[in-house]
């Protein structure tokens, strides 16, 4: 079975910083940025992108659809 490497892209302008993705991530890939977007929200970003396994938990729980998950076989 091929190993899968994941990566996430967060739409910074849509993210409201609800932190649901941070709780849902089993590999602690996501954190809140100390910076804010144009709406004044601290947004989520991949702090440990190498740990991402492409599970899509973050994208599933995101109420605003701000996260896209990409998977590649390695």
Image (cartoon, rainbow, N blue to C red):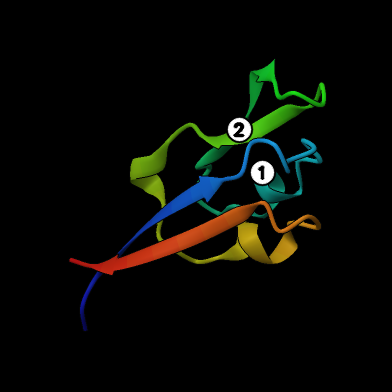
Q: Who is closer to the viewer here, 48 or 36?
A: 36
Quarter residue 31 falls in: top right
Image quadrant holding the N terminus, namely bottom left
Point out the image quarter for the C terminus: bottom left
Compared to residue 65, the image places residue 41 above or below, namely above
Residue found at the far top of this picture: 34
Observer-nearest residue: 33 or 55? 33
- Which residue is found at the position 77% from the left and 35% from the top? 17
Please state which of residues 34 and 66 is positioned toward the viewer in this rendering: 66
Residue in the picture at 80% in, 38% down: 16
Which picture quadrant has residue 41? top right
- The residue shown at (38%, 46%) is 51
Read off the residue under disc 1: 22
Residue 2 drawn at (x, y percent) = 21, 78
Label drawn at residue 31: 2
> Is residue 19 depicted above or below 41 in this figure?
below
Q: Nearer the viewer, residue 69 or 51?
A: 69
């Amino acid at each position: 079975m091929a190993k899968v490497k994941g990566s996430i892209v967060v739409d910074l302008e849509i993210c409201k910083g609800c932190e649901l993705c941070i709780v849902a991530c089993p590999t602690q890939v996501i954190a809140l940025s100390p910076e804010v977007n144009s709406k004044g929200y601290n947004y989520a970003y991949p702090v440990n992108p190498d740990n991402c396994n492409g599970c899509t938990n973050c994208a599933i729980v995101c109420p605003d659809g701000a996260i896209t998950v990409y998977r590649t076989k390695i």
